[in-house]
């Protein structure tokens, strides 16, 4: 039987020894910024939605992290690149096998020729990593999904976390924007 204590868990391994289990968590927060002329401005010009998704780190990212820890240089280089935010309009439920948004849409901060990503500001502490980016709608859309990826030109590889926003999604008009804050917590055992 597991015993919970301060975010860490202890369990008994098959050999009878105690194991420490560290809980890695992820969360995505959103703040919506509407233009005064927006179709949705009556909902408020700035709406802090708080945490909109938790805990779906992709299996592709976990595999990449393990390879980087083993010193494989090509994977190691990817880690510092996880700062490109992409969003989409598909409302399919989250799964840890998803490493990209399903239906990407453009934003005005696009760094690649297609305009599908926005670069985030990265912040690291001793036990967490965060990336913050603002994405502005180029058309009327309802955003349901977000993912942090390592390259602006290929948004389909090694996404850290495809997060889904709960229904009814985030309805945006042209020029409305969302500031995303993605945080990955990696605590030491307590």
Image (spheres, rainbow, N blue to C red):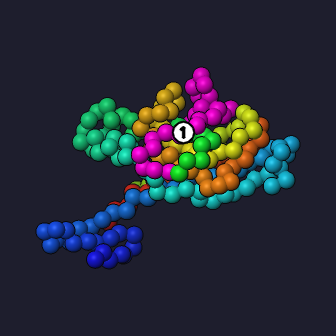
Q: Is residue 66 visible?
A: yes
Q: Look at the picture and state if 28 lies above or below 70.
A: below
- Residue 124 visible in this rendered orientation of the protein: no
Q: Residues within 10 Å of mark 1 (few under 14, many from 20)?
A: some
128 sits left or right of 189 in the view? right
In the image, the segment drawn in magenta is 94-123
Q: Residue at x 53, y 40 (%)?
A: 101
* Residue 132 percent coordinates (x, y): 57, 46
Residue name at image x 55 percent, y 47 percent = 92
Q: Position of residue 36 (x, y in %)?
A: 85, 45
Q: Position of residue 171 (x, y in %)?
A: 72, 47
Q: Which of the pair 184/53 is nearer the observer?
A: 53
Q: Quadrant of residue 168?
A: bottom right
Q: Is residue 97 magenta?
A: yes
Q: Above or below — where is 18 with respect to 50?
A: below
Residue 179 position within the rendered picture, expressed as x and y whole percent measured from the top left: 65, 47
The C terminus lies in quadrant: bottom left
Q: Secondary structure at mark 1?
A: loop
Looking at the image, which is closer to me, 95 or 74?
95
């Amino acid at each position: 039987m597991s015993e919970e204590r301060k975010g860490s868990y202890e369990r008994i391994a098959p050999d009878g020894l105690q194991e420490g289990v560290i809980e890695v968590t992820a969360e995505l927060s959103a703040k919506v910024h509407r233009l005064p002329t927006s179709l949705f401005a009556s909902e408020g010009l700035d709406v802090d939605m708080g945490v909109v998704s938790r805990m779906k780190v992709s299996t592709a990212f976990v595999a990449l992290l393990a390879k980087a820890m083993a010193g494989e240089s090509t994977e190691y280089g990817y880690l510092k690149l996880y700062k490109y935010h992409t969003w989409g309009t598909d409302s399919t439920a989250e799964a840890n096998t998803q490493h990209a948004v399903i239906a990407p849409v453009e934003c005005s901060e696009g760094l690649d020729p297609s305009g599908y990503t926005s670069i985030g500001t990265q912040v690291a502490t001793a036990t967490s990593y965060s990336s913050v980016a603002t994405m502005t709608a180029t058309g009327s859309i309802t955003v349901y999904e977000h993912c942090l990826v390592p390259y602006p030109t290929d948004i389909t590889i090694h996404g850290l976390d495809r997060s889904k926003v709960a229904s009814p999604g985030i309805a945006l008009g042209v020029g409305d924007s969302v500031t995303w804050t993605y945080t990955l917590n990696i605590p030491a055992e307590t």
